[in-house]
Image: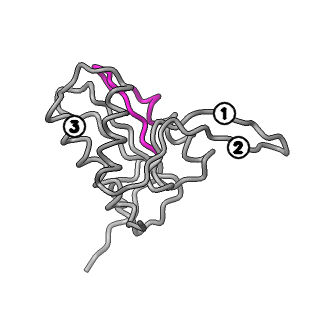
Amino acid sequence: MHIHPDDLSGACINAALRIHKKFRSGMLETLYEAVLERTLTRDGFSVERQKAISFEFEGDRYENAFRADLIVNGRLIIEVKARETNATIHTTQLLTYLRLAQLPLGLVINFGMPKLMDGVKRVVNDLPAACSPQLRVNQPPLPPVHA
C-alpha cells in the first residue's frame, strides 16, 4: 500500500491514540509495541517489529547495528517509549536511525505521558519540502508563502 508520508504518520498516530485511550499509561514499552504492531497490521499496514538494521561506513559493513521498534510500510520508523517524561535523546536517536536506514520519516511515541500527544514527536530525514514543513524538526523552517 503506497500512502503519502503525512497520511502514514497520521494513521500511526491515530492507532496509538486508540491504544492510549484504552490502556492509558503504565504498561511496559514492549506491550505497547506489540499492541501497536497488531493494530497497524489490522488497519492494513505492513509492519516489521524489532527489525535489525545494518549500514556501511567507509567501506565497512556493520551488521545488526540497531533494531527498529517498528517499521511501517517500509518507510516509517516508530520508536516506542513508555516513560513519564520525554527526552530529547529519543528524537536524536530516531533521526540517526532514519539516516542509517535511509528512511524519510519517523515517530517517537511515548505512551507513558498522561496526554499521548505530549509524547508524540515527528522526525524527518530528507523528506521533500512539500510534506508538512511546519512539522519538520530537523530542518530550518521554510519562508512563509504569500498569496
Q: Based on the picture, tell me whether residue 86 belongs to the magenta stretch.
A: yes
Q: Based on the picture, tell me whether residue 27 belongs to the magenta stretch.
A: no
Instruction: Quadrant for the C terminus, please.
Output: bottom left
Residue hosting label 1? 65
Label 3 or label 2, whichever lies nearer to me, is 3
Region rendered in magenta: 77-91
| Badge 3: residue crowd in 10 Å (few <14, some 14–19, many ≥20) | some
Q: Which mark is residue 19?
A: 3
Q: Nearer the viewer, residue 69 or 115?
A: 69
| Mark with earlier residue (2, 1) | 2
Q: Position of residue 35 (x, y in %)?
A: 31, 35
Q: Amino acid at mark 3?
A: Ile
| Mark with earlier residue (3, 1) | 3
Quarter of the image where one finds residue 18: top left
Label 3 or label 1, whichever lies nearer to me, is 3
At a point 48% along the width and 45% down the height, the residue shown is 48
Q: Amino acid at mark 1?
A: Ala
Q: Amino acid at mark 2?
A: Phe
What kind of element bears circle 1?
strand
Q: Is residue 92 above or below residue 28?
A: below
Residue hosting label 2? 55
What kind of element bears circle 3?
helix
Q: CA distance from mark 2 to mark 1?
A: 7 Å
Q: CA distance from mark 3 to mark 2?
A: 33 Å
Answer whether labels 2 and 1 touch (C-beta < 8 Å). yes
Quarter of the image where one finds residue 117: top left
Q: Is residue 112 above or below residue 73?
A: above
The outermost residue toward the left is 21
At a point 38% along the width and 66% down the height, the residue shown is 3
7 relative position to 14: left or right: right
Q: Position of residue 53 (x, y in %)?
A: 62, 40
Q: Position of residue 79 (x, y in %)?
A: 43, 36
